[in-house]
Structures are given as C-alpha cells and as structure tokens.
Amino acid sequence: MVSAAVLVVAVILCVVNLGVLVQGFLARASDAGRPSDAGIRIGLDLVEVEAVASTLDSPRATRYLSRIYTAEEVLDCTDGVRGVVAHRLAGRFAAKEAAMKALGVGGRAVPWNAIEVVRRPDGQPTLALRGEAAAIARSLGMSRFSVSVSHEEQYAVALVVLSA
C-alpha cells in the first residue's frame, strides 16, 4: 500500500516532469514562429477514494451517480461481484475535475456528465465532451485529449492534457 505522502510526492514529480516537457515543446513551437501558448492546456486533480465510497453508501448515491456520471461510466466502473467500485469512480471524478481545470471553466455552468471518460479500443482513457464542455473546447481550439488516471486504495489522480 502506498502512503498518502508518497503518492503526493509522486504526483508532484509527474507534474514537474510534465512541466519540463511542455516548456520544451513550447520553446520549440516559439522557435518555429508559432504563438508561445502552442495550444496546450493541462489539468490535474487528486480525489480521496473514501469520499466517493461514503457517498455511494449514503441515501444520495442514486442522485450522485446520475448527476456526475453517464450510464456508460457507471457500467464501466461496475464489478459483477462488488457492484459499483469506488476507486474506479474516484478516478473518473478526478479526470472530470482535471478536464474542467484544463478547460478553464471557472464560473461557467458545465454539468459533470457533459465530460465523459471513455475507453478507446486499446483501453486508454480519453474524453467525450458534450454541450457546454464541447463548446468551450471548440472556442479554445482544443480537439485532442490525453488522459491519464491512476488509483490506489486511498487516492485517485488524473492528468488531462488538451491540445489543438
């Protein structure tokens, strides 16, 4: 089992390494005469699995599931033996929150289920955006989504990179 401190340090190191890679990419893009933002946006989120688990065990569970997740996400996070698996949902929640951060939604009303975490045929997660989330991505010129999700017993973390 990984301690919370080790997980947090690992996330920080990943973000620092990603930052170095992005800076290198931006420098090359700037050298090539493109704008320095180069059309990349990044979001990161960390979720406590117990917070999701306690909601699933509460009277609010049905409303929570329908408000935050699509039916396909709930199905993908369901195990035939255990039912809905909290750490899987926590990973999806972290990815949705990271996507909102990358989109810079701020005070705009974007429903949680307008951002869906789906699996590509190769098993890698990606995003399907609808409604206001899709409109924001289009307005930013973002059409490619890279998603990384990881979860342990206590925490789930997700990193979302949006690019043109």
Image (spheres, rainbow, N blue to C red):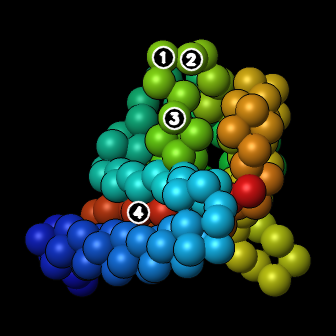
Which residue position is annotated with label 1?
107
Secondary structure state at the residue bearing disc 4: strand
Q: Dividing the image into 4 quarters, which one contains the N terminus?
A: bottom left
CA–CA distance in space, label 3 to label 1: 9 Å
* Residue lying at the far right of the rendered structure: 121
**In percent of the image, x 26 and y 78: which residue is there?**
13
**In percent of the image, x 32 and y 62: which residue is there?**
155
Q: Is residue 100 left or right of residue 46?
A: right
**In percent of the image, x 62 and y 31: which residue is there?**
112
Q: Dividing the image into 4 quarters, which one contains the C terminus?
A: bottom right
CA–CA distance in space, label 1 to label 4: 23 Å
Secondary structure state at the residue bearing disc 2: loop
Which residue position is annotated with label 3?
104
Q: Nearer the viewer, residue 55 or 130?
A: 130
Can residue 78 be seen here? no
Q: Nearer the viewer, mark 2 or mark 4?
A: 2
